[in-house]
Image: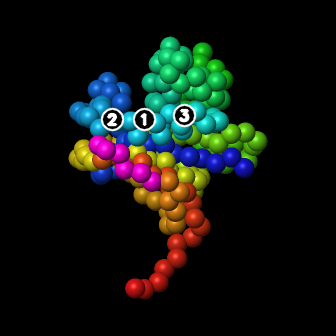
Amino acid sequence: MRKIIVLEHISLDGVIQAPGGPDEDPSGGFAYGGWIAPYSDEIPGTLLRRQMNLPFDLLLGRTTFEIWETYWPQHADEWPGANSATKYIASNTRTSSNWQPSVFLNGDIAELVAEIKQQQGPDLHVWGSSNLLQTLIKHDLVDAFWLMMYPVTLGGGKRLFAGGTIPAAFKVTEGIVSPNGVIVVNYERAGEITTGSW
């Protein structure tokens, strides 16, 4: 079975909107696009490149896909895997793209994604895609959160857990703090929540 791995740049207050640049996603009046730039250093960059070089397919929301389909074909030298990966896009309005291979998912997204998980193939990486993420989380389809947490609060913007969560336990399988204070951590599902007293 394929795993769904959510990879996100995230602020201390849970915002994942427009980490890469001012024009990435100004929707809702978000004024802090490019908020990760001041914290760039070698450690997150090295770990990020490692993730980008693993075998993967992409599972994306329409907005993230539309940002990427104009960028990555022109920058194949930076991330060749983005172009060769099969891209599964949740969209009620799009049915085709010149950026191939692409598969558009329309209808019951949770059911369609659950079916894709059962197929043979590499893990499915989710970047950005805040609306799609809420569906994946609500239907318990996420297997791991690979997060780069930055020492900044943004006040408003699209959040990773905007739609709430289901009860679930996770284990940390990797964690490191960069010189600029970025915490890179991988949380993998670890079954049900256990309780006790201390």
> SS class of the residue under badge 3?
helix
Q: Is residue 157 left or right of residue 128?
A: left
Q: Position of residue 103 (x, y in %)?
A: 65, 29
Q: Which label was assigned to residue 89?
A: none
95 or 6: nearer the viewer:
6
Residue type, label 3:
Met
Q: Position of residue 108 (x, y in %)?
A: 62, 44
Q: Is residue 82 left or right of residue 151?
A: right
Q: CA distance from mark 2 to mark 1?
A: 7 Å
Q: Earlier in the sequence, mark 2 or mark 3?
A: 2
The reply to whether dot 2 and dot 1 touch (C-beta < 8 Å) is yes
Q: CA distance from mark 1 to mark 3?
A: 10 Å
Answer yes or no: is residue 183 visible. yes
Name the residue tied to disc 3.
52
Q: Earlier in the sequence, mark 1 or mark 3?
A: 1
Residue type, label 2:
Ser
- In the rendered structure, does residue 179 fall within the stretch colored magenta? yes
